[in-house]
Every structure is written in structure tokens, then in C-alpha cells.
Image (cartoon, rainbow, N blue to C red):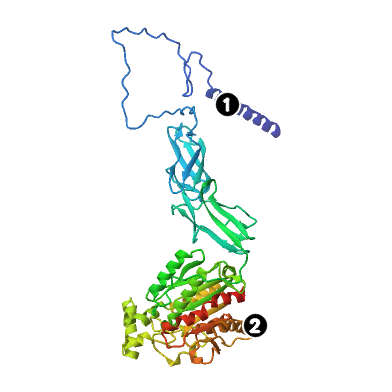
Amino acid sequence: MYKFKSTLLFFFCFTFILFSGKIAYSDTVSEPNPTSEPTVTSDSTLISEPTASPEPTPTSEPVTSPEPTPTSEPVTSSEPNPIPKEIPLLSQKELTIVYGKKGNVPKIKNLPANYKISYKATNTSVATVSNKGIITPKGIGNCKINIKITDLSYDKNTVYTLPLNIHIISNIKKITYQYLESSSITLAVSQTRKLDYTISPKTSKIPTLVWKSSNPDVATVSTNGIIKAKKQGKAKISVFVKGNKAISDSIKVTVTKRADSFSPKKLSIVDPSSSRYTYTAMETDIRQLQKKYGDRIHVTTIGNSYDNRKICEITLGNPNATKNIVINSAIHAREYMTSQLTMRQLEYYCSNYYNGIYKGRYYSELFDNVCIHLIPMLNPDGVSISQFGLKGIHNATLRRNVEKIGKKYGNGSFSFYKKWKANARGVDLNRNFSPGWKTSARNYKHPNSAYYKGTMPASEKETQAIIKTINLQKPVATLNYHAMGSVIYWYFGQKGELLNRSKKLVSEIKRLTNYMPINGSYNKKDAAGLGDWTSICKHIPTATIEIGRSQCPVSIKEFPSIWNKNKEIWVATASLYD
């Protein structure tokens, strides 16, 4: 019974709840009203019925549009400009420019209304171009200039590249052989000679030259202008500018058989009679020799003295030779005749370069294989003191120091300065090298006219200059000219192969001069010299040749005898190493 009542109660409650929910749902949903207006969203567009436009009212005056107001800013359209009908073009695609002058990029046709332009040369060793289109020649030859044009008025991505071919030609007007005594030369069989030339104007860029022999069986010529004598006969050697045969020169060559002897030519530049060969005289002689024999010698400056004089090095022969000999003179001031001697030797070899013969060999052949490096006046300040006293020094501080030395050790007399050996700082340059430096110099503790060794080895500019030269040239031998005594210092403790090579060198010098060889290390107080350093430190055969017999400065009366004994020293030494 209880179970039946519970079931009836549950059914009644469920029916009530279901009926109540149905009523609530029907109240929230309304039926559409067919008579209400339509709702339009903001996204909807109403299309109205078309209406007729009213007829225009006729007037007596025409209706005009208002004038546009001018502005400073250009009116631009959002629409792109039309593509140009024609592309940019060069008015000429080839341009020839004479070296020494400038040119301009030719006119460009059909440029856009708005553009950017740039230039670039493909070979700047021939020509360069500025951002304004100015072309500057840098060499002879051909190159290309690319002209890049960017169209800014239509599309910044539109780029045109216009190539311009550039030809740089030489401005040379004349070519002339140089260092020739006449319009013909004579060579012996197997001799060679390099032809030098000048071009005008001097600002010309050297063009490509073409060398030609009219008879190659007699004489040939290389692309560098080197003539080689082949057999007896005659030939003409010509040179002309490539592409322009009108600019040319020629010389007659006579080839003879090889001679056994020769007649030396007369010398006219270095004065052998002057009793005081000065630094100024040497400079003048160097200039004259260089002007006359510039194909045989080359002059460089290896340093400057404390009084600002140049220390010159003169090369004789082939500067590219694998063997070198270094010769120096006047390391001691009062021994300036040695400069006069070596400069006279230089002129002698220059003058007889192609006709001189030593033991069957022409001088030119010997010096082509073994180059001479001459330092004719290593101590120019000291030479000037020995010759002119205090007046020989320009620098006021140096002059005061020299004067102090003169007053302290020589009462300021000119005879004291005349015997001067040191440089302008009172350092004996031939006591300024490292071997034996600590034990040398006879206890001279302060600057003096001689024997003071300096504060340390190689403390002086002049010493440093010759050390640098020897280190650079790596000579097979060195010759150091001194005065006086007519002797040869050569032995500095050498052993083995170096000793044998040193003996060979000194024997040849003795044969020519009859000077007496002396043990160079006989007095340790006189060590620290250039000969010591060259032999002991660099292991190079060396000879210190002392000319003359009278007290220094050696009398000029001795020069003829000294000359005859020494004039062939260079070529004799070269023949040892040829």
C-alpha cells in the first residue's frame, strides 16, 4: 500500500513540473509579426528606385571650372608614369684619350626625367673615372667604363648599364737614344750593350717599344734593348713605339773581332791635380758622371751625416748581378785623397766600359757579372773639418763641440784640424765597430780628433750606413781605402776557406800595387775597425789598402804614382769572382 502511494505521488509531481516548463518556454518565443517594418544592418545597402535628373537650366554665359591654385610642391599622381618609349643610349661607345690629358664621358641620350647615375672603371691602372664622369688616364692601354643609370621616375628597380670602351694612347712625340757618343757604336763578338733612351715630353707615359735588328746574324736586340754581338759585320738597331712607327730612333752597330788590348780613353771629369778634393767637388763630379754615363752607374743615398751631408753609394755595372764588391774611402777625414782616387777610378771604368780589357775579358762583361758598390766619402763632415777647420761645419752646436775639442787638445790651431780623422762628433769611425771594441782606442775616453771609439759599437750614423750597405749587398769582397804607408792590412784571424779566399784577394792587390801585406790584428788597440768587423763578423774577404808614403793629408805629388798602381784594382778584384 505504501509503495503504491509513493508511485502515485511521483507521477503527480513529474506531470506538474513538465506542464509548468512548457508554459514558461512559450512565453519567451514570439511569433513573427507580418505587419512590422524590415530591420537593416549597418552592412546592408538599400537600392532606391532610379529617378530622372532635372534638365539643366540654360544660361547666357558658359560655366567654367575654377583655375588650379599653384603650389611649390609638384602634384604627383598615384598612378605610375608610363614606361619610357626609348632607353638611354651613349652618343658614342668608344673614346680615345691622350695620356696626360683628361676626358669626359660622352653625352647620354634618352635619360629618364628623374635618375641616378654612377661610373666604374674595370682597369684603374689604365684609367679612373670620377663621380662626375671625368676620365683620368693612369697608363697606356684599354679598359672599359660601365655607366649605371637607375630610373627613379618610373620604377627604382629599372637599371640600365651602358659600357664605354676607353683607349689611352701615349702622348710621346720623340724617342732618342741616350749616353751615346755618336750615331754608331762598336762591339766585339759576344759583347752586350743595353741601349738607354729618353722620351719627350718628359711627362709621357713610357709606351710599349718594339726593337728590331736589320741583321740578326750580326747583332740581335732583346725586348729590353740589350744588343748582343754575334759575328763580325754591321747592323742597324731600331726602336719605335708600338702602333706608331713614325716615333722611332736607330743606331748603327759594327761588330769586330775580340781584341787583346785597348787604348784607354782620356779622362776629363775628376781632377787629379787638386790638392784638396772637397765634398762639393765630389758632388759635382758625381752629377757629371751620372749625366754622361747614366747607363753604367746609379747613385743612391745610404744615409746623412750629422752636419746633413749625403753619404752616397754609386753602383757600377749590373745592379742585379748575383755578386757584389763594396769599396769605401775617406772613413778617416784627413785621408781624403782616397776619395779622389776612387772617383777617378770610377770615371776610368765608365769611360772604358765597353772597350777596356782585363785578361781577355771586357770590362762590361766583368761588371755585368760582378757589380761594384762605391761609397766614395764615408766621412764627409770630417773631411770638411780637415780641409776648412771650423768653417767646414754648418751646424752651430756641432761647430762649438769641434771647437772645444780643438782648444782642449790642439790649442785651436788650424794644424790640429788639418790632422782630423774623426767625424763631426769626435768619434773615430774606424774604431766604432764591434770586434775588439772594449779593448781598442788607446784609452781615449772622450771625443777627440782621432781614436775615440764612441759610446758603443755602431753608435754613429756613418758606421750604421756602411753596415747596412754590406748587410744588404752581401759582397764577395770589400776594399777599404786608407792613407798612408803603401801597405795592405788583411789578416784578422781568419781560418779555413775564408783564410784561403783572403790570401787570394791580397795576393792580386799586391801583384798590382807592390804594397806590403801586413797582419791586420798586430795591435789590439787599433781593433774595432771596419776590416775587423767585415772579416770576423761577416766572414767576407777584405783588404785595407793604405796609399801613399807621406804624412796625411798625402801630397798631391804622389797621386800619379798612386793612380798607376791602383787604377786596375776594381776590375782585377771582379775577375777573381767572375
Gap in Å between the C-alphas at discs 1 and 2?
137 Å
The secondary element bearing badge 1 is classed as helix
Q: Secondary structure at mark 2?
A: helix
Residue nearer the viewer, 192 or 424 = 192
Question: Percent x, y for residue 231?
Answer: 64, 60
In the rendering, at what x and y percent does residue 119 appear? 47, 43
Q: Residue lying farthest left? A: 60
The image quarter containing residue 2 is top right
Decide if residue 475 is in sight here: no
Residue flagged by tag 2: what amino acid is it? Glu
Q: Which comes before the other along the chain, label 1 or label 2?
A: 1
Label 2 CA crowd tier, 10 Å (few <14, some 14–19, many 20+): few
Q: Amino acid at mark 1?
A: Ser
Q: Residue at x 42, y 83 (%)?
A: 557
Q: Which residue is mark 1?
A: 20
Nearer to us in this view, 93 or 51: 93
CB atoms of marks 1 and 2 within 8 Å = no
Q: Residues within 10 Å of mark 1 (few under 14, many from 20)?
A: few
Q: Position of residue 382 (x, y in %)?
A: 39, 80
Q: Quadrant of the N terminus?
A: top right
Residue 378 numbered mark, or none: none
> In which quadrant of the rendered view does residue 311 lie?
bottom left
Q: Nearer the viewer, residue 153 or 134?
A: 134
Please say if 131 is above or below 155: below
Nearer the observer: mark 1 or 2; the answer is: 2
In the drawing, what numbered circle is on residue 497?
2
